[in-house]
Amino acid sequence: MKRTCSALLALLCCSLIPACSRPLPTRCVITAATRVDSPPALTPLAEYITDYLPVGTAEPDKHTNSIRLTLDTTLSSEAFRLEVRPSGVDIAGADYGGIFNGIQALFRLMPSEIYAKQRPERIELTDTILTDRPRFAYRGMMLDVARTWQSPDAVRRFIDLLAYHRINKLHLHLADDEGWRIEIKSHPELTEIGGFRGGDSPVRAVYGKWNEKYGGYFTQAEIRELIDYAAVRNIEIIPEIDLPGHSRNIASIHPEIRCNYPPDTVSTNGYDYRSAWCVAREENYALLSNILGEICELFPSKYIHIGGDEVDFSQWKRCPDCRRLMHRKGMTVPSELEDYFMNRLTEMLAAHGKHPGVWNEAAASGEFTHDCLVYGWQHVKANLDATEKGYRTVVMPGEYFYFDMRQTPQEDGHDWAAIFDAKKVYGFDFAKLGFTEEQMQHVVGLEGTFFSEAYVSHHPEQPDYLDYMCFPRVCALARIAWRGNDEGWDAFYRELVDEHYDRMAAMGIRFRLFPPKITYRDGVFTAATDDGSQIYYIKEGSDDEHRYKRPLHTDQPHLYRFFTRYRTARSPYVADKSYHRTIVPAFTLTTSMGESSSTPYSNAEKYKGLSRTRRACRQQDWIRYDFANAVRCREMYLQTGNRQLPKTIVTTGYAEVSYDGERFERAGELEKGSITLHPDRPIKSVRIVSTCNDNGTPYVTIQPPRIKPIL
Ligand code: ACM
Ligand code: ZN
């Protein structure tokens, strides 16, 4: 235990010199002399407290008080009673979780610095009596370590952040098309090969990283440590192996698990796209039994998540073995093959006393066992359906709870489910969305997710992507899972700003602030915030940040972007609408990679959407834009691939411009398949030239140019 010399001296002085004595405090004061008293079963919680508070490092004196932890079985599960008096703190809970929740309630009465583990010397608390209990038994967050590997230290940090918010389940997405992250001792190849992508790995780097081999996995020993670490913090880890789809990774290592037909590698650039397990191949169940057996032995959780989402049935339809199995079993639709497969897995789990967690598709037919947890991810309706069928459901529709979605249209992230911020998460309202009282009986709780396909932004000057995407959305999720939203957004927002922001800063979270409010009128910009953050602006053409102190006079509003900072946090940029204005000059598109018939050039030429090439790119392949009339502009953004999902980009290459449509000169290197040009003359043509051989997917996606006019 750490004890400084001066603390020791002070201690000696106090015990020897009577003048040192002070009147008994009238408020509760936590100091080094404070003791934590707990029964042996709660020792981990006593130790947890000492990580944050200055307790137990000095000899007791007459001011010594205690933080007393006691079990009280009259309380409901995870409920607690917290009493703060001059004589100390009493935390009673029905169970370990209740006391942990009471400790978090106590921490919230303290200065936010305690979350930085600075263990302040003296903490004064006012008298408080507080009882509380959770709304839902399941308050979860999913972390995808399959797409982007995250080390045990990173996961431990994430567990801490969730624990502060009284989230009590960590759903770990351990295997997907892009990675296998958990050691299976009977099949070490799954991680030795499947834990890494890129380079010489047969598992392709699909998102973000290209040539280098990268990745990692948890050894079973590391997972045990994580399980224990989480358990101390009242968090249960629920592992997921996503089956039978999302299995391209393991199928790259064990191609024999795939359906029995020749791969369509011509149209897919040599890349075998079959990603589902063959249902008819009996040996597959032996392999799965080994894998799930080890998972069941490793994880104490009652539920093991076995996936069940987004299965591409076309593979089973093409497979003679799967078709024969359907015929033999009298099945009429391929979804019955999924029922069959998932039931086989359920039997394997049952042999270990475990039950399945599944994504909502696996329970859509209603035929799947009801002794499971259904995770309703696709939309609200999927949750209404699952609860209607009587399934115990973890409610997590993507349009409210997928924290990989971007938060405003201009920010990073996906958008397929919705674009939303913490306010929308907080506003999730079961009754308004049509959940009846009967259906609510089947809701076990709520879960947020962080899928990590786009977890590639680690610019030193940008907030960490994981933190930025998850916080404060996790705060809102945690609040509605714990208590609901009866107090209303305005009250919760004030609490966020007045309390959570400093706590999150002390926790080291690089969270997202809400953007400042800006107006531009009569040649004057004004910007304002109501959260105590500082406002900055940048002017196009430079990265210099200027502190906004007073209204800004300009007749060029399209050149300015504003944002805010507060301690570890920052907001997204906001700008006047003129900043986003674009023009759509006519152009023709051609490429050396050929035109896809399903997504022709005309999609991009009409600025309607995406076009695709017919094949992947090779060195010296090109994409060319010829404008009908030379274009004068202040900015031209050329992009390959989909925004934020850059798997179909020209991986490496450069752009060339031509002012006469004939002679081209090099204008710069592509970065993540894109380039922004700032031409000083009218442009007649531009060309993207590939320097990569193969972009890892069967085609390149072409976007229309985004062109900002000279204003
Ligand atoms: C999922 O997002 N496919 C569960
Ligand atoms: Zn098959």
Image: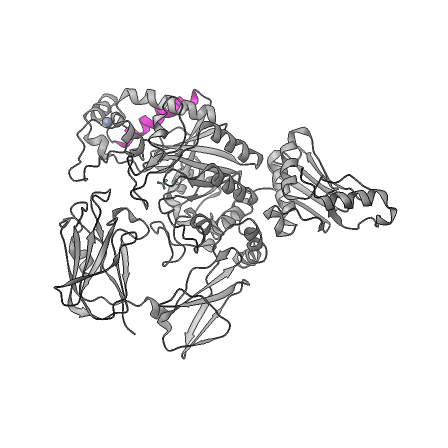
> Which residue lies at the image location 42% right of the left edge and 23% below the top edge?
294
SS assignment for the magenta stretch, majority: helix
Vertically, is 200 above or below 631? above
Q: Quadrant of the C terminus?
A: bottom left
Residue segment shown in magenta: 333-352
**Residue 457 percent across, percent down from the top left:** 38, 50
**Residue 420 versus residue 337: which sits nearer the camera?**
420
> Which residue lies at the image location 19% right of the left edge and 47% below the top edge?
617
418 horizontally vs 611: left or right: right
> Which residue lies at the image location 83% right of the left edge and 42% below the top edge?
15
Vertically, is 687 above or below 259? below
The answer to whether residue 364 of the structure is visible from this angle is: no
Looking at the image, in which quadrant does ligand 2 appear? Answer: top left
Vertically, is 21 above or below 549? above
* Residue 257 magenta: no
Colour theme = one colour
37 horizontally vs 255: left or right: right
**Residue 225 percent across, percent down from the top left:** 52, 31
**Residue 497 percent across, percent down from the top left:** 55, 58
**Residue 702 versus residue 97: which sits nearer the camera?**
702
Q: Quadrant of residue 333?
A: top left
Q: Quadrant of residue 670?
A: bottom left
